[in-house]
């Protein structure tokens, strides 16, 4: 039987949910009104969000936890324990993340670790990199060249004398020109299109024997110092590109301005690997009387580009002489 003072009696479907007799009947007595239960304080929103953001974005979870505690102290809202849990979780996640980042940043490279584990050398030895070779300064370039006596021996010519050195790339203003300017660098002396921003020093020295005119004998040695080894390698690649493009073809050397001479045809050979990083090339010119040969050699080491040419007549001895000079210089460049 439903108690009229318990409007939500045992069977909620057995009477009027708003009290009184079921189906509109009159209550047996006057209604009794009871006070509503006291309203529970709501849970602080920041406290709840603190727990959520502890796993999503821990720093935000920590901030929300502190805000929630501050509001709870002022308003008396529920959720203090929840805010504390959110703070603890947030700081725990932050700590774990920091430890993981530090561990990742300090661990050695994977390949280095595997290499160290396969050898008996201590880890500190494997992690130490080889010392970097000192780069050559512009003032150090002349000291890399062989002496005049060395060059005389390489060329088997005791009559060589040195001309004044040069300190910039490119042909002189009164030099002969060619009908294929793009192939001019194969003649020697570096490349006129050198990266001047990266070039920090240039030193060129030519030795000649003019006792047997017109059979002029010559040894040209050019050293170019760059700001770093990659710049020297770029210049070497630039020269090799020109050599490969012009190799196997012919160009004509034209007389200097003001001089009346017929053009001289120059046959440019195909570049070849001469060992020790050196690339060699042979230029053959058929003059009006003699057939001269210009043996070329280029190589780069550290921050220095080496450009060698040896001119002899009716002999291939210049090829070995050019390689001897280039190898001598390579031995003097720090590595």
Image (spheres, rainbow, N blue to C red):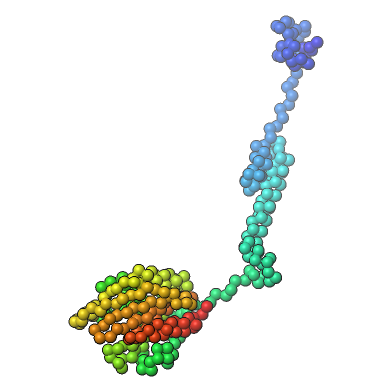
> Looking at the image, which is closer to me, 2 or 42?
2
Tell me, yes or no, if residue 193 can be seen here.
Answer: no
Image location of residue 176, percent across then percent down: 26, 79
- Viewport quadrant of the N terminus: top right
The mark total stands at: 0
Q: Position of residue 249 (x, y in %)?
A: 31, 71
Q: Residue drawn 73% across and 5% down?
A: 26
Can you say whether 1 is above or below 251 in the image?
above
Seen as rendered, the residue at the extreme right is: 1
Q: Nearer the viewer, residue 244 or 81?
A: 244
- Give the residue displayed 60% in from the left and 71% down from the top: 129
Name the residue: 29% across, 80% down.
285
In the rendered structure, the answer to whether residue 144 lies left or right of residue 250 reads right
Percent coordinates x, y for residue 39 in the rendering? 71, 27
Q: Nearer the viewer, residue 57 or 290?
A: 290
* Occupied quadrant, residue 225: bottom left
Residue drawn at (72%, 43%) of the image = 85
Residue 103, by quadrant, is bottom right
Q: Position of residue 183 (x, y in %)?
A: 32, 72
Q: Is residue 265 visible?
A: yes
């Amino acid at each position: 039987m439903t108690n009229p003072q318990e409007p939500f009696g045992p069977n909620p479907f057995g009477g009027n949910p708003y009290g009184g007799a079921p189906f509109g009947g009159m209550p047996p007595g006057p209604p009794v009104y009871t006070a509503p239960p006291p309203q529970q304080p709501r849970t602080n929103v920041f406290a709840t969000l603190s727990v959520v953001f502890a796993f999503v974005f821990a720093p935000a979870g920590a901030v929300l936890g502190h805000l929630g505690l501050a509001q709870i102290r002022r308003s008396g809202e529920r959720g203090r324990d929840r805010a504390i849990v959110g703070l603890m979780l947030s700081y725990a996640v932050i700590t774990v993340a920091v430890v993981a980042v530090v561990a990742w940043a300090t661990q050695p490279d994977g390949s280095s670790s595997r290499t160290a584990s396969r050898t008996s050398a201590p880890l500190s030895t494997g992690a130490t990199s080889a010392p970097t070779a000192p780069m050559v300064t512009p003032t150090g370039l002349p000291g890399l060249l062989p002496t005049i006596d060395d060059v005389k021996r390489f060329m088997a010519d005791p009559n060589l004398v040195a001309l004044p050195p040069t300190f910039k790339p490119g042909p002189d203003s009164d030099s002969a020109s060619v009908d294929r300017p793009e192939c001019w660098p194969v003649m020697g002396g570096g490349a006129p299109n050198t990266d001047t921003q990266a070039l920090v020093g240039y030193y060129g020295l030519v030795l000649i024997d003019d006792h047997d005119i017109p059979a002029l004998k010559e040894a040209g040695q050019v050293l170019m110092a760059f700001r770093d080894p990659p710049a020297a390698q770029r210049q070497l690649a630039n020269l090799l590109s020109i050599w490969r493009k012009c190799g196997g073809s012919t160009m004509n050397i034209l007389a200097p301005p003001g001089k009346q001479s017929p053009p001289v045809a120059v046959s440019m050979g195909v570049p070849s690997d001469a060992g020790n990083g050196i690339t060699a090339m042979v230029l053959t010119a058929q003059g009006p009387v003699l057939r001269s040969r210009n043996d070329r050699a280029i190589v780069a080491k550290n921050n220095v580009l080496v450009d060698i040419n040896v001119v002899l007549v009716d002999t291939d001895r210049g090829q070995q002489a050019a390689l001897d000079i280039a190898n001598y210089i390579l031995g003097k460049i720090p590595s």
